[in-house]
Image (cartoon, grey):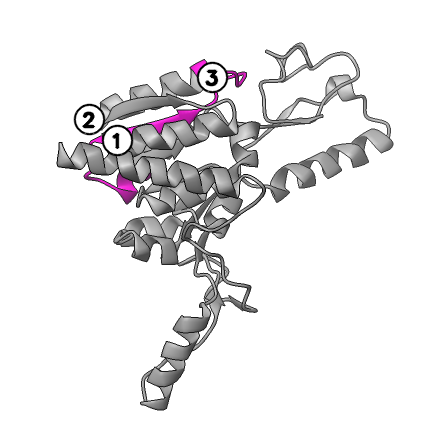
Amino acid sequence: MFTGEDPVKTGLVVSLNRPGGNVTGVSVLTTDIGSKRLGLLHELVPNAATIALLHNPKSPDVERHLQDVQSAARGVGKQIRLLNAVNEGEIDAAFVAMARERPDALLLSPDPFLTSRRDQIVTLANHYKLPALYEWREFAITGGLASYGPSHTEPYRLVGIYVGRILKGAKPADLPVIQSTKFELVINLKTAKSLGIEIPATLLARADEAYLPALGKDEVQERGLQRSQGAPGGRHRTRHRPGGDRGGDQRPAAQPQACVPQRLDKNAQGLEIHRVAVDAAAHHVGSG
């Protein structure tokens, strides 16, 4: 078993310590870290008074996550604006509301559907200059400001260990369900710069990865001109954990990830229409 939900609540096991039956495995904490993620967003955008929380009301543990986030928000003097989305159209509608109400930041709730709309959500958030914290590192790599969530690789390593023990004769009922507690904080430095956000040194030091996308064509040409004039420059992507064991490890350059609205998929035309409607609504509110 490998699940992101509470295995006891869903009936997969009797208890975490003594699962019983013929099932055991790894449970990934996703909904129980809402307060931690709200705290990180507060560090990224300390002056944010109102934070929009985009969530799927049909998600299994939505109430527990919501209570966790709201409790943390009260502790740091933040207001939470709850926005529901159960389909692509409601994601568009949520951003229409955000363009009208102008929250200071966005927190995305953990949910498989919202994760599947990663490109749509990241593109809209960046288009409207909305600092956002997401769950999975792929959001930050795609162009989101930052992500904090469970490690993708750690649960599989733990599952492999259990598979080995079961193959050697251990009974699943006697193996406690492991809760994976390894999390990753990823910060996209290019997006932070485009949003005018200076990442605190203390937060950067705790990041597992400070991601700098490859330069675009225009930036490469500009750097080349600077180099020809004696200024430093180059095309690279730096992945590192400041102060950690990765040092200044540099990896091969990847294709640049766009952080501006672009045609993403078959829904792009509808997305463009949505943006026109939002811009018109924002202009109306501003002129009023």
User: What's the residue type where badge 2 is placed?
Assistant: Gly
Q: Is residue 227 above or below residue 183?
A: below
Q: Which residue is mark 3?
A: 57
Relative placement, left or right, of 202 versus 120 is left
| Mark 2 / mark 3, whichever is N-terminal | 3
Q: Nearer the viewer, mark 1 or mark 3?
A: 1
Q: Is residue 9 above or below residue 244?
A: above
Residue positioned 29% across, 44% down in the render: 44
User: What's the residue type where badge 3 is placed?
Assistant: Pro
Q: Which mark is residue 100?
A: 1
User: What's the residue type where badge 1 is placed?
Assistant: Arg
Residue positioned 42% across, 49% down in the render: 261
Q: Which mark is residue 131?
A: none
Segment tinted magenta in the rendering: 39-63
Instruction: Classify the position of the N terminus by image quarter.
Output: top right
Q: Which residue is mark 2?
A: 77
